[in-house]
Image (cartoon, rainbow, N blue to C red):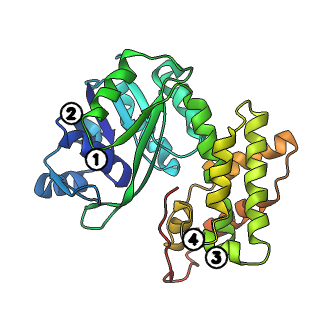
Amino acid sequence: MRILVLGAGGIGGYFGGRLAQSGADVTFLVRPRRREQLARDGLVIESPLGDARVPVRTVTAEAVRPDYDLVLFTCKAYDLDSALDAIAPAMEGTACAVLPLLNGLAHFERLDARFGRANVIGGTCQINATLRPDGTVVHGDPLQRVLFGERGGARTPRVEAFAAALAATKVDWVLSEDIDQDLWEKLVFLCALASCTCLFRANVREIVAAPGGKPAMERALAANAEIARREGHAPRAPMLESGRARLTDPEGLWSASMLRDLEAGNRVEGDHIVGWMLDRARAHGIDDTILSLAYTHLKAYEARRAAGRLPGSFARVTLGPD
């Protein structure tokens, strides 16, 4: 299987790097500066599961050709337009499929419209990975899972080929029989975590210790679960119980990556996660209190950021898995 990985940042660099390390046929679609860095230093990974320095093949946007079987799509939601344009030459006139590893569900409509639903595999990932300024991919803890499958549950040669490629790596992976359900369940939890940790600018432990914090977490989770139920994907009981435990853990040091981006003064995926769920809460007449307040908070932050009115530094960034 010939794999094109969009980007060599935290997610693309880690999973693509592990595939390349195992001998898979992987090429990274990167910008010229990152290409020079990779040519000079290799793809460097620091991880509790083993460090690596991997020589990798790269290509820049103007040189992409329809030479691949799978595109691993690892952009941020706010870069979706440019990312779609970047991979389009790889998708033209071939049987190439795209496997997105973004958070949420909003991107599927755009991918389906651009490349056809039959060419879009369902997928997501769970990992704490960041890119240092020197180009090193830093994997923060042992969690590193890829969840993927055909939307509809079929076992096709392409998903089995990707499973075989992952099986040769250190990566934890699941070939799902119901990826739509899995994606909804992740979104229910992630949106509650992102909404509350961004709204209150705190990690789980700090929120739960504050007056009203635990009920707010539970209210956010309940609203999101009801949205999923109305959309035909009611979360399964074990998922809800584990999500509730993590969101109300009095010792929970984790927060959403969206809060980390916000506290660093970076762009956030507020529209893609919180705004998207807010629209569905209102369409179904579901309690939107937490979603609405969190979305207003995120949009106000974006306005201040665009106007250059953010503080010069942010005191604390709390790491934890989404």
How far apart are the two marked residues, 2 and 1, measured between alpha carbons? 18 Å
Looking at the image, residue 206 lies above or below residue 268? below
- State the mark number for residue 30: 1
Distance between the alpha carbons at the discs numbered 2 and 4: 41 Å
Q: Which residue is mark 2?
A: 24
Of all residues, the one furthest to the right in this rendering is: 285
| Front-most of residues 281 and 310 | 281
Q: Is residue 221 left or right of residue 251?
A: right
The residue sitting at 39% across, 23% down in the picture is 159
Structural crowding at the residue carrying mark 1, measured as other residues with C-alpha within 10 Å and reported as few (<14), some (14–19) or many (≥20): many
Q: What's the residue type where badge 2 is placed?
A: Ala
Q: Is residue 8 left or right of residue 311?
A: left
Image spot of residue 269 (x, y percent) = 57, 55
Please name the amino acid that badge 4 sits on: Arg
| Among numbered discs 4 and 3, the one appearing first in the sequence | 3
Residue 305 location, x and y as percent?
57, 70
| Label 4 – label 3 distance at C-alpha | 25 Å
Q: Determine the secondary structure under disc 1.
A: loop
* Residue neighbourhood size for the residue with mark 4, other residues' Cα within 10 Å, grouped as few (<14), some (14–19), many (≥20): some
Which is in the foreground here, disc 2 or disc 3?
Answer: 3
